[in-house]
């Protein structure tokens, strides 16, 4: 193996709860001596996991692998990423206590974050041929409705975006509200993906590795046409539609900072305005105008109709608010 000293050192601090050690599944036996990181990344790519999902998995798994057992030294980044597949199995096998300590370290995280981290760890365990311990269960997160902006807030955001010093801000807001694109999909959009005559764009390799068609109105066409000369003036380094002043492709984090500034300019709390909130407004707007769930699902790129169905509950909330406002007006008129 060439790394026997490492394994011997680890055995001293990893007391098992059963007699025999963990065994790699047959599909991994021939790769037992190879670096785990490259092998596992290849597995994620083979399964069609998106780049964002891969990043999310790696954040969770690196924390798990680094989690020290009592009397262990802190693991270096080089040792962590340089382990072989067999060494990784010995370090994270489900019954040596490391997984339990790592799960307990997530206690202050939100239920949705914990579920995402556990999903990553569960995927790794399955890949290594191990069963997930029955006593480690996912937390119940309850039903959380997507946040949306009110009509007044939306109007203020649009007004602030149209007056923004950075012209790309108006394009970002207009396109998300008109297409429902995820911020990562918008950042990846190339000029060749857009058909202005057809009022459509093609999302290539979106979430889940799927391609889909999105549609937009004449308002977006006009905004894109106004943006193109400004984009050319920035001497873009590629074909991306959205570019920075330096000509590089716009990143998701840059757009979130843009939303924070826009919220300040619109006079609404920063937490109220995110690219995903605008995407939710797109979806609820379609529903309120009579679009069916299946069509909205396809436009949003949801893998399951159950994900789209949550917007029905938002629509119910909107209906209640409209009813209450109408009742208030009636009472005021009578008095």
Image: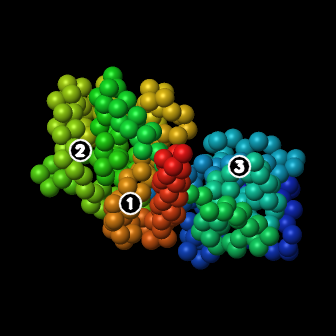
Residue 171 visible within the image:
yes
Say which of marks 2 and 3 sits in front.
Answer: 2
The foreground one among 277 and 244 is 277
* Residue on which the image places disc 1: 288
The answer to whether residue 231 is left or right of residue 140 is left
Residue 82 coordinates in the image, percent (x, y): 61, 49
Q: Marks 2 and 3, how far apart in space?
A: 39 Å
Label 2 crowd (10 A; few <14 / some 14-19 / many >=20): many
Colour scheme: rainbow
Of the residues under marks 2 and 1, which one precedes in the sequence? 2
Circle 3 sits in a helix, a strand or a loop, which is it? loop
| 226 relative to 21 in the view: left or right | left
Asked whether the viewer can see residue 35, the reply is no
Percent x, y of residue 215: 25, 56
Disc 1 residue crowd, few under 14, some 14–19, many 20+, Cα 10 Å: some
* Residue occupied by mark 2: 220
What's the CA distance linking mark 2 and mark 1? Answer: 21 Å
Residue drawn at the location 15% of the way across and 49% of the way down: 196
In this view, the mark in front (3 or 1): 1
Instruction: Identify the residue at image location x=35%, y=69%.
Output: 292
Which sits in the foreground, 100 or 301? Answer: 301
Foreground: 83 or 187?
187
Residues at marks 3 and 1, CA–CA distance in whole angstroms:
34 Å
- Residue 36: x %, y % from top left: 58, 57
Q: Residues within 10 Å of mark 3 (few under 14, many from 20)?
A: few
Q: Earlier in the sequence, mark 3 or mark 1?
A: 3
Residue most extreme to the front: 335
Helix, strand or loop at label 1? It is helix
- Residue, disc 3: 109
Q: Quadrant of residue 159?
A: top left
């Amino acid at each position: 193996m060439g790394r026997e000293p490492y394994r011997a050192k680890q055995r001293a601090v990893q007391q098992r709860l059963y007699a025999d050690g963990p065994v790699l599944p047959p599909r991994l036996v021939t790769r037992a001596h190879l670096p785990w990181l490259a092998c596992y990344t290849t597995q994620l790519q083979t399964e069609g996991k998106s780049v964002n999902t891969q990043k999310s998995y790696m954040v969770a798994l690196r924390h798990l692998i680094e989690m020290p057992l009592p009397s262990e030294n802190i693991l270096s980044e080089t040792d962590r990423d340089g382990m072989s597949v067999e060494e990784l199995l010995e370090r994270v096998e489900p019954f040596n206590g490391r997984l339990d300590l790592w799960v307990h370290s997530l206690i202050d995280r939100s239920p949705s974050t914990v579920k995402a981290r556990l999903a990553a760890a569960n995927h790794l365990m399955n890949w290594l041929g191990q069963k997930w311990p029955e006593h480690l269960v996912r937390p119940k997160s309850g039903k959380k409705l997507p946040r949306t902006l009110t009509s007044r807030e939306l109007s203020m955001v649009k007004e602030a975006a149209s007056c923004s010093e950075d012209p790309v801000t108006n394009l970002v807001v207009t396109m998300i509200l008109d297409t429902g694109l995820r911020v990562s999909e918008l950042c990846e959009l190339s000029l060749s993906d857009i058909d202005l005559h057809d009022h459509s764009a093609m999302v290539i390799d979106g979430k889940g590795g799927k391609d889909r068609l999105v549609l937009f109105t004449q308002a977006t066409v006009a905004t894109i046409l106004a943006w193109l000369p400004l984009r050319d003036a920035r001497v873009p380094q590629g074909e991306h539609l959205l570019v920075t002043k330096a000509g590089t492709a716009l990143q998701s984090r840059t757009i979130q900072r843009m939303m924070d500034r826009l919220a300040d300019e619109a006079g609404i709390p920063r937490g109220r305005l995110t690219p995903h909130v605008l995407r939710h407004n797109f979806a609820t707007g379609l529903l309120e105008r009579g679009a069916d769930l299946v069509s909205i699902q396809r436009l949003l790129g949801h893998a399951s109709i159950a994900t789209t169905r949550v917007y029905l509950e938002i629509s119910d909330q909107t209906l209640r608010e409209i009813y209450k406002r109408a009742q208030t007006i009636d009472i005021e008129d009578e008095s």
